[in-house]
Amino acid sequence: MFDGNIRTLQRVAAKMQRVLVVDPNTAAVRLLADQLRHVGNVQIFHATSIEAGWSMARTVDPLLIFVEHASHGCDGLALARKIRRSDLACRENPIVMCTAEATAEAIFGARDAGIHEFMRKPFTIKDLERRLEAVTLKPRDWVEAVQYVGPDRRRFNSAEYKGPRKRKADGAGTPAARLSQALRIVKSAATALDTDPNQARRALAAQAVELKKVGALVNEPRLVQAAEALEACTAGPTAETLGRQELLKRIDSLMVFMAEDTGRVA
């Protein structure tokens, strides 16, 4: 199993003790469950519809979720988007999509819904192992934006990818790149305060934390201070008392750090 190392197997098993499978095909679920149980003491929860899957996600807090792409009205994309934008404890946990139709439209749709990995049916035990290894041992950065909520899409289908960076922009991870992405999300969230207020404020809170880290990393106290001011306006005891205008004011104070030259901090 995997690299044959018992410690690797234990690490994988620890991160998938509770697995939710949302698929109306009982036979397919039984086959997947049998394969998953080879990993260890895994609890399998089965839902045959999106409604039942949502209910189980709320009650059992799955560490790993498998969803069907689209079968007999079972829309896994809709469920993934709903979980990602919810307040459930499992909202950031890995989701693997399974489908017999591995079209470009299906793959990109899964990616944009916040799916971690995509697996074509029928799949082999090796296919499953690669996906399990990817979602349990190779975590990806979490993106909390407005239009998109989920794992960093630049590493989508990482279990299959063997080469160097998929994009030149993947030299990301640098302070300048992190600053640029966080500020772009802040700017987008500001425009969504009226149309999607809950997710907009959640995105702002997440980016405030990220901007504080970047500011500390590059030793820029002005950035840290501006990020802390935004954080106080989106989370914590004072968030409810500070109005929308004050929030926009604090967002504006961060926009001065949005430099055209992404190789430096403004």
Image: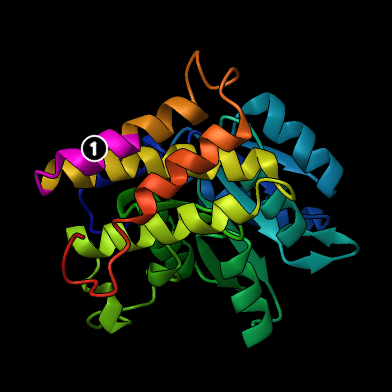
Instruction: Give the labeled residue for mark 1.
Output: 224
Q: Identify the residue at image location x=80%, y=53%.
A: 26
Q: Position of residue 32 (x, y in %)?
A: 61, 55
What's drawn in magenta, residue-wise?
218-227
Membership of 225 in magenta stretch: yes
Q: Amino acid at mark 1?
A: Val
Q: Position of residue 181 (x, y in %)?
A: 37, 61
Q: Identify the residue at image location x=51%, y=64%.
A: 117
Q: Farthest residue in the top direction?
A: 237
- Residue 237, placed above or below residue 93: above
- Residue 211, placed above or below residue 234: below
Membership of 14 in magenta stretch: no
Element type at mark 1 = helix
Q: Residues within 10 Å of mark 1 (few under 14, many from 20)?
A: many
Q: Position of residue 140 (x, y in %)?
A: 36, 55
- Main SS of the magenta part reads helix
Q: Is residue 90 visible?
A: no
